[in-house]
């Protein structure tokens, strides 16, 4: 399938494009690329975001003993007195201490590192944990969009639109289509598009993430956004 992304490899050279088709290219994951994916999913696929990521604040324990203690507890979905006493006794000196004293100290240590213990258990569930910096950033981005009348209207449906049978909207949708002149099999992954049957309007919305808008004009040329837009309109 020909896509906007694959054409970028072909522009570099036919050999690069062939390597791309054969999965022979090594990709270097950039942090800003990963950030962009997270922002897209957070805004456009909130249900998928909840399955994949967890926004969670936690502090790493101050000592290796505390980390090891939490690691032992995290192996169990729930902790009882026996598990707490054993984990504590394996890592700390308990000479001369009663079972009640050991349990009390173990419980206190568990409560102190409650957030970190939750983090370890969530990791076991296969979720990617995003810390406080991500949480604040994503909430700030969404708040900025919601407060911008045009951006908010483009990216989010109103309750009235959700109930309107003549209004359709889809996010993160793959469309497979045939290029009309040469018949190439093509694929486009659209961030969002809207079909307003009542007003006979179709809207294509593509979410761009950038550190700054200052060089946006240069980015349009560098990443061939004009070609991407044409590709997406063909798909629609």
Image: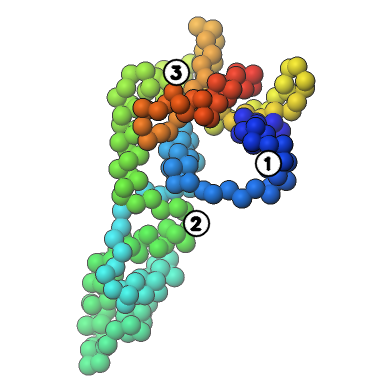
Residues under labels 2 and 3: Cα distance?
35 Å
* Label 2 vs label 1, nearer the camera: 1
Looking at the rendering, in which quadrant would you find the C terminus? top right
In front: label 2 or label 3: 2
Whichever of callouts 2 and 3 sits on the residue coming sooner in the sequence is: 2
Please say if the residues under marks 2 and 1 sit with CB atoms less than 8 Å apart: no
Q: Position of residue 117 (x, y in %)?
A: 35, 64
Foreground residue among 225 and 110? 225
User: Marks 2 and 1, Cα distance to the nearest angstrom?
Assistant: 34 Å
Circle 2 is placed at which residue position? 126
Element class at badge 2: loop
**Residue 81 location in percent, x, y?**
33, 76
Q: Which residue bears the numbered disc 1? A: 16
Instruction: Return the disc, 3 or 1, that comes first in the chain's sequence.
Output: 1
* Image: 90 above or below 156: below
Quarter occupied by the N terminus: top right
Nearer to us of marks 3 and 1 is: 1
What number is the disc on residue 161? Answer: 3
Q: Earlier in the sequence, mark 2 or mark 1?
A: 1
Please tell me whether residue 115 is drawn above or below residue 73 in the rendered image: above
């Amino acid at each position: 399938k020909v896509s906007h992304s694959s054409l970028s490899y072909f522009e570099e050279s036919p050999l690069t494009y062939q390597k791309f088709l054969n999965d022979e290219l090594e990709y270097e994951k950039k942090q800003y690329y990963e950030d962009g994916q997270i922002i897209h999913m957070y805004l456009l696929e909130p249900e998928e975001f909840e399955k994949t990521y967890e926004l969670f604040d936690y502090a790493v324990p101050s000592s290796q003993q505390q980390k090891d203690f939490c690691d032992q507890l995290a192996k169990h979905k729930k902790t009882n007195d026996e598990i707490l006493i054993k984990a504590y006794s394996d890592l700390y000196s308990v000479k001369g201490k009663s079972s009640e004293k050991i349990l009390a100290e173990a419980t206190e240590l568990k409560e102190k590192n409650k957030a970190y213990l939750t983090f370890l258990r969530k990791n076991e569930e296969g979720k990617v944990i995003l810390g406080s910096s991500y949480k604040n950033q994503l909430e700030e981005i969404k708040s900025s969009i919601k407060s911008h009348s045009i951006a908010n209207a483009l990216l989010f449906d109103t309750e009235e639109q959700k109930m309107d049978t003549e209004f359709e909207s889809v996010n993160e949708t793959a469309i497979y289509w045939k290029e009309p002149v040469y018949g190439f099999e093509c694929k486009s992954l659209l961030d969002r598009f809207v079909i307003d049957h009542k007003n006979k309007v179709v809207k294509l919305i593509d979410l761009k993430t950038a550190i700054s808008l200052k060089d946006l004009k240069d980015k349009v040329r560098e990443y061939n956004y004009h070609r991407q837009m044409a590709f997406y309109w063909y798909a629609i």
